[in-house]
Image: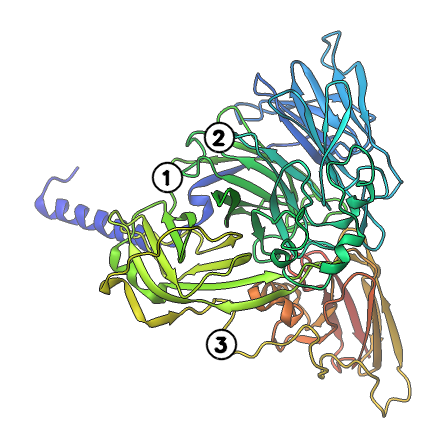
Amino acid sequence: MCLKKSCVFTLLSLISLSSIAQKNTVQSEKDYYSLKTIAIPEEVRLEVGGLAVMPDGRIAASTRRGEIWIIQNAYGSGQPHFSKFASGLHEVLGLAYRDGAFYCTQRGELTKIEDRDGDGKADSYTPLSIFQLSGNYHEYAYGPIFDKNGDMLVTLNVAWVGYGDGLGKWHGWLLKIKPDGTQEPFATGLRSPAGFNINSKGDIFYAENQGDWVGSGRVTHLEKGDFAGNAGGLNWTKEPESPLKLTKDDLKVVDNGQPMHEAAKIIKELKLPAVWFPHTLMGISTSDILEDNTNGTFGPFAGQYFVADQGHSKIMRMSLEKVNGKYQGACYPFYEGFASGLLRLRWGLDGSMFAGMTSRGWASTGKENYALQRLAWNGETPFEMKDIHALPDGLEIEFTLPVDAKVLRNPMNYNINSFTYKYHHQYGSPIINNKIRKIKGIVPSVDGKKVKIVLDSLIAGYIHEIKLNGMTSTEGKTLLHDFAYYTMNNIPDGPATELKPADLTKSGHATMSHDMHMNTPVKSVNSPITAKRKLSMPGDWGQPDVTIKLGTKPGLKFDNTRFEIKAGSKVRLIFANNDDMTHNVVVVAPGAADEVGNLALKLGLKGAEMNYVPNSAKVLFHTKLLQPDEIESIYFNAPATPGEYPFICSFPGHASVMKGIIKVVR
């Protein structure tokens, strides 16, 4: 130990330099949350469809293979132990535990499962309620979740027949099922309601996936008699038990691509989403919803919600507020990099989060076929946008940590856009009506943890993208995530924000989205015919030397993944998208598949308008983004240099798994 002044000075200098370096270091999600993987025995195929935490802390997991497993020591206090509790079930996509019994949704029924002789294995299977099936593969069933009265909530997918349709009775509905098995249809308009939740106030929310009538992923508050937007469930509104009488014919007047907010002015039963999760910008397949009721054990977001995404293998965060009596709010990134496709989230007894995953047939960025992982907070507060609130003339952003007033007042630190989606029977929607917002004034709070952004105007029914540039906290932390999306269904009543001279920006600062640059031309959805996308055969060809026919298979796959052609040959590529999702075909330079896929992911708001084909020299040939059942042919000369040329679907989230090779030979 050295006690000389020079040593002390050196030690203090090192501490100071270390502190500065720490402040200037860009933080990551792993600096605040630790992700642990529960080891699964090789003989266990844990394709998680449901999770339940038992009173003694054991974790029960139901699987798509029709089994229920009970896991001991899942918290890391020893080697986990798996025991099979039940088997022989049909794709169990939901699980609950109550009063010593398990309750699960199989494909065709809600079942109560018990261990009456106490040997640790199920010996009693009681069907409580039967669901009608047509045999269509897309008729998934989820739940149950118990409400405060002991009734059970279940959601049923619509079938897929080139579009969503309720072929089996009550498919496309949320059902309330009494303990005696009586079914009470509650709300419809659901397409693929894989995740739903009853919050601490007794309100029901469900997460939806992009599809027909659904422009993007979203979370909707459901009340009895609501219509959430998808037409398939309206097949059953003529039944005497139906709480609404809306029909498919009633939707014809609004099936024109207008924004959903405008359609809701005509169709009074149409319930607007509380929060949109912009497609590919946040995720591609929303699944479970989990309210943070851990009282701060999981971080600084108590009372908010975590929303899983199956395709992007990540968790997003959601905050809600009521404006004019209706829910609306914002979504934010939270934690990505899970091992497989997230389907179920549940709180452990210690306030950590268990995440159950599966990807078979539902491809995900996580490469594993299935996994069970546990996420825990380390106690340090990240610098984040904690919450966003609507104002009569703008938005108020709340931070987890204070920010210097000078930083908050700088208008160059803010980019704000508004946009929306089409409401129509077609699959998904491009972003429409994108508009760069102008900032009139900026008002920081005294404590530096809030800032009011006064805009030139607000548009009801639109999504507002908030992008913060170079924002740091007073202690030097950079924002862990610098963007969010607020859904402005209603504009609050009240007086305008009082602006002092110091609050005003010069002539209304025009914000610039990180994804939409005013000086950058944007391609339309029907991108022009170019050397990379020729839609007609060149006149001097006579005929192609080779025709490549390409289709799709379930699970984000092309139906053929390897072709061989001669260098310089005349090629016609016919792509038939026979899937229920949008896809394209992009042929790239050797070794460039991941690079081009990542560039497509970063296109952001302009991605759909560019068919998710980035402007890169490594993109050689491509189709446009095709809707389900659409076909396109392109013509090109094969590269002169032999080699393996990858082809991918560059739609975000697809490129990592939806790929193949064109081998060029002499």
The 10 Å Cα crowd at callout 1, few under 14, some 14 to 19, many 20 or more, is few
The residue indicated by pointer 1 is: 380
**N-term-proximal mark, 2 vs 1:** 2
**Type of residue at label 1?**
Glu
In the displayed structure, does residue 464 sit left or right of residue 313? left
In this view, 612 is above or below 635 = above
In the displayed structure, does residue 80 sit left or right of residue 580? left
At mark 2, the secondary structure is: loop
At mark 3, the secondary structure is: loop
Q: Residue 588: in sight, yes or no? A: yes
Say which quarter of the image contains residue 38: top right
The 10 Å Cα crowd at callout 3, few under 14, some 14 to 19, many 20 or more, is few
In this view, 473 is above or below 287 = below
State how far apart marks 2 and 1 are (Cα): 19 Å
| Residue 209: image location, x then y, percent | 68, 49
Q: Are marks 1 and 3 in contact (CB under 8 Å)?
A: no
**N-term-proximal mark, 1 vs 3:** 1
Q: Quadrant of the C terminus?
A: bottom right
Question: Which residue occupies the foreground of this view, 448 or 235?
Answer: 235
Say which quarter of the image contains residue 123: top right
Tell me, for residue 635, which label it has, or none.
none
Q: Residue furthest bottom?
A: 540
Q: Residue at x 78, y 39 (%)?
A: 140
Question: Which residue occupies the foreground of this view, 651 or 327?
Answer: 327
State how far apart marks 1 and 3 are (Cα): 39 Å
| Residue 390: image location, x then y, percent | 43, 51
| Residue 162: image location, x then y, percent | 83, 55
In this view, 530 is above or below 245 = below
The residue indicated by pointer 3 is: 518
**N-term-proximal mark, 3 vs 2:** 2
Tell me, for residue 293, which label it has, or none.
2
